[in-house]
Every structure is written in C-alpha cells, then in structure tokens.
Image (spheres, rainbow, N blue to C red):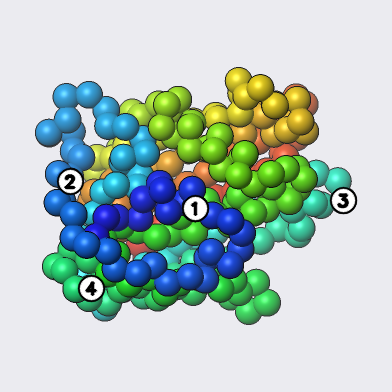
Amino acid sequence: MKPVTLAAFLMLAGAPALAQTVPAAPQASEAPAVTKANTATPPNASDLLFEQPQMKNVPPGTKLTYDYLRRSGISKGPFGPPLNDTIKLGVEPGNAADNRNIRVEMFSGANRFPAGPFEDMPGNPVMMLFLEHHLIDLARVLMANPRYIKNAIRKGLRDNATVTPTQVDFKGRKVDGWRIETQPFLDDKMKERMRGFENLKYTFVTSEAVPGELVSIEASSKNAEGGELLQENLTYDPNAG
C-alpha cells in the first residue's frame, strides 16, 4: 500500500473525511528512503512529506504524541479561543512488516475531533490530519472554497517549496533532517481575497531518526504591523508516553 499520499490530502471534502478509515490497497514497490547519503540534490517536498514509509521505524505498541497549538490575534476571534492540546497515535502491527494500524486521539475533552482509525498504513497520518483540520478552519475564516485553498497548498508543496538539510535535537543528540518551507499564496491570482493571509507560510521538519519521521509543522501569518493572524504548530513530543 502507498503511504499517506498527497492525493489523500487532496481528496478532502470536509470534516467527515477525518473520520474515515483508510482501506488497505495493493502493495506498491517501496520507495527508497530519502537520505543525504543517497540524494545528490534535495528531494521533492511532496514526495518527502507524503510518499515515504514513515512508520517503519515505529515499533508496534508505541504511542506517538504530538503537541498542538493554535492561536490568533485577530479581533473577534474568527479562529476561536487559543487551542493547546495533543494528537496521539496508537500504533499496532499492520499486514506488512513496515505498515501499521493506527488509532487516533485527536484532541481531548470538549475539543475531541473524530479521526481514523487508519489501517495498514506505511505513512504517518498526522501530517494529513493537521493539514485537513487547518484547511477546514482557514476556508471557514476566509469564507473561501476549500478546494481552491487545497489546490494552492498542493501546488506550493509540489512546485514552489524549498527543501534544505537541517539538524534536529532529539533526546540529547543532533540528528539529520529536512526543512521544507512554502508560501503558496504569495503569487496567487486571488491573493487580494486572502484578507492578509497571502503571506501564510508552512514549515515542515522531518527526520528519519525520529519515530514517525515528523518533527514539526508550523503554519504562520502576520499582518504588516507584525500582528499575529495565525500561529498553528504541531510538534512531536519524544518524552510523552
């Protein structure tokens, strides 16, 4: 089965998509891991984020925890009050050696959002969960067509992203990783309707040394005066059980 693909993210039609179970698909030939050792030039951003078997380094029985933060300084709070919560993935064996069955706890208490489960996944679904949830909120705030925003993010990751080597602090040591950055709306023909969000920047950090490979995601935008329009972060917590 293919990993959590960019195509899966692009199929988003609304919130219910987060609650769907991803069915198993025929086994595809496994793509080689993208490392500095076997890559003469930086990998394509969408391939790096969505086409790698990221869960192969997560032993069954593991729980992955990601700290989530969303806040905005916009008056009258169209994004709602600040949200500081967690997304937890319970990882169990899949049908193939590198695949996993994954249970999701997306936020807690009154913030709980239905998501998963995901069956026989080689990729890390938290990437898709973050982007889908972000897209729903952004489309609502901008009163925009979510498909248009979705396609702009897709194009930014595919055609207009920078991928640079970086180092990540992980359990007291430095490990190699990749930093992916894109601002998909800067040159968009409809950017005048973005209400200041045309400078929205997405930053992803990944490392093969980190379980699930995802280290962090950030979506951020500020106005011309430096005021915070949106700050949204997802960060892997290596110390959480």
Circle 1 or circle 2, nearest the eye: 1
Residues at marks 1 and 3, CA–CA distance in whole angstroms? 31 Å
Q: What residue sits right under mark 4 in the picture? A: 94
Q: In the picture shown, does residue 48 fall above or below 66?
A: above
In the rendered image, residue 127, in percent from the top left (x then y), is placed at 43, 53
Give the amino acid at mark 3. Answer: Lys
N-term mark: 1 or 3: 1
Q: In the picture shown, does residue 51 fall above or below 124?
A: above
In the rendered image, residue 89, in percent from the top left (x then y), is placed at 40, 70
Residues 27 and 57: in front is: 27
In the rendered image, residue 209, in percent from the top left (x then y), is placed at 23, 51
Q: What residue sits right under mark 1 in the picture? A: 11
- For the residues bearing labels 2 and 4, Cβ distance under 8 angstroms: no
When asked about the image quadrant of residue 136, the answer is: bottom right
- For the residues bearing labels 3 and 2, Cβ distance under 8 angstroms: no
Circle 3 or circle 4, nearest the eye: 4
Left or right, 214 with respect to 182, comes to left
Circle 1 or circle 3, nearest the eye: 1
Q: Assign a secondary structure to mark 2.
A: loop
Is residue 241 in view from this perspective? no
Dot 4, how many residues are within 10 Å of its Cα: few (below 14), some (14-19), or many (20+)? some
Q: Assign a secondary structure to mark 4.
A: loop
When asked about the image quadrant of residue 32, the answer is: top left
- For the residues bearing labels 1 and 2, Cβ distance under 8 angstroms: no
Residues 103 and 223: in front is: 103
Give the amino acid at mark 4. Answer: Gly
